[in-house]
Image: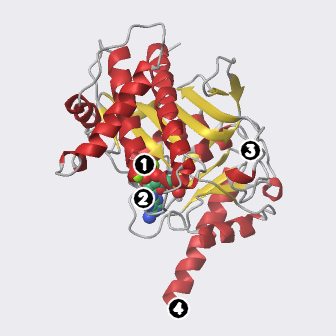
């Protein structure tokens, strides 16, 4: 299979980074002093996750040139007053790497300078030539803070095309979340098994396996629903990230009966790839520019499972332009049967919205 070595490395890196995030999220949720405005645990986990993925990929694929386009950089950590947090992150990463494989001798511990360097390996610009890894070390930061969904999202671009994607979703139940409209994770039963690892390589389909377990992977497929009345749709939990009103107007036009399933992060793409819902609608507020690390891994996980991912105008997403996606209005996902109907509903709803705005 093509990209076998890269896939092994990516799964290992994303799983280990997810373990680091789980540890931080647990401490964050248990902490009595936690306040909503305290973003430092998130920062620790974002940087730590990015360092772990960067180090693991370089170690496992040492014979290849390495380019990484990632969300975080070390600029803030190099400022005065950051020494404490820098030391916390370094300890967290060292502990995570030391526990990776108890049978293997532990590499010598990283210094704070090693950690900063590992984070800054992610400053590549990407583009149409060569290979670039693309990483969102924690996608769905807001969900992470709430104790809800988030994902470690890692993809590989080759000559501007996505060829591999891995999504580690520590809080996503292994069983379907179809019908879980607006249910937060704290209300789900504690016996529900959580933690999914989705992965796909170009031309080989999409697979899911439990995170942190050796259980065999299963091949997954998007929903085969053909009648939009039977479809349900995903959108961001955060209204600031996507226009919920526009999505609801599109869903009405299509005749969708179920209320939206609102969850954070690229866990939406993972859930779609196994058919938990049939449609994903994402319409950022005007002026927002989508970044590639928010969609690279999710896009291949869905397309290899039989889905279609386009912008609101029906064009495939172009990941070859650097860090940003150059988009018409939004991102939509559906199966082949629903996509033509969805595109029409999107066009009509946007036209109506524009007409209303111009008559004000
Ligand atoms: N105003 C905005 N509009 C659209 N997306 C936004 C946004 N502000 C932040 N985002 C992006 O939305 C991502 C989360 O998506 P979702 O809403 O599906 O959970 C964030 O990823 P991070 O959490 O990695 O920063 C961030 O990149
Ligand atoms: Mg993100
Ligand atoms: Mg992020
Ligand atoms: Mg962010």
Q: Residues within 10 Å of mark 1 (few under 14, many from 20)?
A: some
Q: Look at the numbered discs 3 and 1 and tell me whether their residues touch, using CB distance below 8 Å.
A: no
Residue labelled with disc 2: 38
The first of marks 3 and 2 along the sequence is 2
Residue labelled with disc 3: 276
Residue 38 in the image, given as x and y percentages of width and height = 42, 59
Q: Residue furthest front?
A: 32
The first of marks 1 and 4 along the sequence is 1
- Label 4 near ligand 1 (CB < 8 Å): no
Measure the alpha-carbon separation of dots 3 and 1. 31 Å
Res 263 visible: yes
Judged from the image, the secondary structure of the residue bearing numbered disc 3 is loop
Check residue 49 in the rendering and tell me which mark sits there, or answer none. none
Residue nearest the observer in this picture, 143 or 60: 143
Judged from the image, the secondary structure of the residue bearing numbered disc 1 is helix
Measure the alpha-carbon separation of dots 4 and 3. 39 Å
Residue labelled with disc 4: 359
Q: Residue furthest left?
A: 80
Residue labelled with disc 1: 41
The structure residue drawn at horizontal position 21% and vertical position 47%, both measured from the top left corner, is 75
The structure residue drawn at horizontal position 83% and vertical position 54%, both measured from the top left corner, is 230
Seen in the picture, residue 37 relative to 6 is either above or below; the reply is below
Seen in the picture, residue 28 relative to 93 is either above or below; the reply is below
Q: Residues within 10 Å of mark 3 (few under 14, many from 20)?
A: many
């Amino acid at each position: 299979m093509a990209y076998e070595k890269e896939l092994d490395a990516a799964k290992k890196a994303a799983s280990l980074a997810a373990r680091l995030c789980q540890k931080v999220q647990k401490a964050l949720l248990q902490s009595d002093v936690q306040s909503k405005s305290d973003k430092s645990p998130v920062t620790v986990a974002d940087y730590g996750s990015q360092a772990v993925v960067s180090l693991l990929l370089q170690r496992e694929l040492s014979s290849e040139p390495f380019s990484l386009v990632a969300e975080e950089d070390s600029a803030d950590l190099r400022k005065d007053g950051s020494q404490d947090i820098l030391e916390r992150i370094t300890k967290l990463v060292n502990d995570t790497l030391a526990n990776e494989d108890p049978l293997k001798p532990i590499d010598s511990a990283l210094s704070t300078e090693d950690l900063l360097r590992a984070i800054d390996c992610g400053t590549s610009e990407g583009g149409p030539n060569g290979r670039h890894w693309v990483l969102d070390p924690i996608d769905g930061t807001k969900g992470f803070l709430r104790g809800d969904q988030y994902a470690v999202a890692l993809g590989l671009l080759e000559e501007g095309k996505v060829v591999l994607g891995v999504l580690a979703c520590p809080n996503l139940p292994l069983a379907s979340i179809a019908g879980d409209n607006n249910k937060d994770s704290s209300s789900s039963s504690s016996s529900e098994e959580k933690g999914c690892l989705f992965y796909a390589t170009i031309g080989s389909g999409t697979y899911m396996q439990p995170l942190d377990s050796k259980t065999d992977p299963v091949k997954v497929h998007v929903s085969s629903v053909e009648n939009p009345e039977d479809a349900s749709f995903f959108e961001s939990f955060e209204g600031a990230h996507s226009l919920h009103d526009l999505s609801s107007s599109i869903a009405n036009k299509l005749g969708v009966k179920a209320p939206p399933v609102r969850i954070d992060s690229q866990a939406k793409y993972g859930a779609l790839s196994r058919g938990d819902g049939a449609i994903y609608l994402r319409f950022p507020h005007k002026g927002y520019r989508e970044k590639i690390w928010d969609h690279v891994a999710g896009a291949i996980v869905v397309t290899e499972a039989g889905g279609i991912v386009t912008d609101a105008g029906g064009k495939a997403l172009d990941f070859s332009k650097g860090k940003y996606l150059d988009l018409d209005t939004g991102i939509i996902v559906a199966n082949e049967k629903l996509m033509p109907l969805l595109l029409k509903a999107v066009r009509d709803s946007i036209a109506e919205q524009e007409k209303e705005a111009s008559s004000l």
